[in-house]
């Protein structure tokens, strides 16, 4: 029983915060995973550490204006990584000012509630395994392909975060040994080839020019690809090939049943998933890997919030 923590409808309420390189989202969430109130702020990813923290603090402040806030019993944070769940610190590759940043302590001081932290890829795995495309699978990789590339693993029917919470962080597997240096310190990482900014860079270098609105984002490249632009199509093919190589390697290592892919780049649909299937036929060659199923994530942009809420609900029992 959760009487002491029950929301106004009898269900325990938690707050969830989802921190990425582009946006910081927040929600009040009940024990069934329903988002009851939401808010969103842009991430000042190139700003100083305290400026980024200030943007994060605005999210719980927005949620606290809701009349149900007094019923909230814990806060779950899903953050771009790497993270260290034991220390409560974050070092997102796409937020340069945060290295070993004590995010959990800072948010706990603000809200005066228990706070727990998970990586954004693990949050996606939590959400999709709870009530999305990964439901029913015992061994699945869940990936987010957006400003960055992250991932989380479900092994033997349980989300597996690893000792620091970074297991499944597939975006920083090297798939090009002679590739470009990555901000993580590696070289030829999946993120540098498959993320939204990588798609936009490749298309720009190939001669694609923004339209009258000046938009040269991955979403704009997707529009050009749908119109048949060969450079834009090549950019998505390159992204899909990098993803296929990393997925096949992971599936070979831990014998996956399926992969679930979400995030802004996945919203391009067939532009990403059709070449991904084609390249998987090349890279996933062993018999026990060839049957790998590929699914589009079902929870969309809410997945990070649902996953962070799942972590908060676990924290309160």
Image: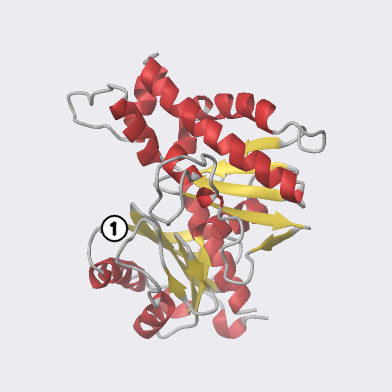
Residue 146, picture quadrant? top left
**Residue at 28 percent of width and 66 percent of height:** 52
Outermost residue, front side:
178
Residue 9: x, y in percent?
A: 55, 70
Please rate how many residues cluster around mark 1, counting C-alpha atoms within 10 Å: few if below 14, some from 14 to 19, many from 20: some
Residue 273, picture quadrant? top right
Left or right relative to 291: residue 98: left
Which quarter of the rendered picture does the N terminus lie within?
bottom right
Residue under label 1: 45
**130 and 72: which is toward the camera:** 130
**264 and 72: which is toward the camera:** 264
Q: Is residue 307 above or below residue 274?
A: below
Outermost residue, right side:
287
Secondary element under disc 1, as helix, strand or loop, is: loop
**Residue at 37 percent of width and 74 percent of height:** 101
Which quarter of the rendered picture does the C terminus lie within?
bottom right
Left or right relative to 299: residue 101: left
Residue 11: x, y in percent?
A: 59, 71
Q: Is residue 314 above or below residue 46?
A: below
Q: Identify the colour scheme used.
A: secondary structure
**65 and 40: which is toward the camera:** 40
């Amino acid at each position: 029983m959760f009487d002491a923590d029950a929301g106004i409808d009898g269900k325990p309420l938690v707050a969830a915060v989802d921190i990425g390189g582009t946006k910081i989202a927040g929600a009040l969430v009940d024990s069934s995973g329903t988002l009851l109130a939401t808010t969103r702020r842009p991430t000042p990813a190139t700003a100083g550490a305290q400026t980024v923290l200030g943007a994060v603090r605005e999210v719980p402040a927005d949620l606290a204006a809701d009349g149900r806030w007094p019923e909230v019993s814990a806060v779950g944070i899903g953050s771009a990584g790497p993270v260290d769940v034991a220390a409560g610190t974050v070092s997102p590759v796409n937020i340069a000012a945060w290295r070993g940043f004590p995010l959990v302590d800072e948010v706990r001081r603000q809200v005066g509630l228990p706070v727990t932290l998970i990586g954004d890829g693990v949050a996606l795995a939590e959400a999709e395994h709870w009530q999305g495309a990964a439901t029913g699978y015992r061994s699945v990789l869940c990936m987010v392909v957006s400003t960055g590339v992250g991932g989380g693993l479900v092994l033997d029917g349980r989300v597996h975060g690893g000792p620091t919470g970074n297991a499944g962080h597939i975006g920083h597997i090297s798939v090009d040994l002679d590739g470009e240096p990555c901000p993580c310190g590696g070289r030829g990482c999946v993120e540098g080839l498959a993320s939204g900014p990588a798609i936009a860079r490749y298309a720009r270098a190939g001669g694609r020019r923004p339209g009258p609105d000046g938009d040269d984002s991955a979403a704009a490249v997707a529009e050009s690809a749908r119109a048949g632009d060969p450079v834009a199509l090549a950019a998505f093919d390159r992204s899909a090939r990098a993803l296929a190589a990393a997925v096949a390697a992971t599936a070979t290592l831990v014998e996956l049943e399926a992969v679930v892919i979400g995030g802004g780049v996945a919203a391009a649909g067939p532009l990403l998933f059709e070449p991904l299937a084609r390249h998987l036929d090349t890279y996933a060659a062993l018999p026990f890997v060839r049957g790998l199923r590929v699914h589009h994530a079902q929870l969309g942009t809410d997945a990070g919030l649902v996953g962070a809420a799942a972590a908060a609900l676990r924290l309160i029992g």
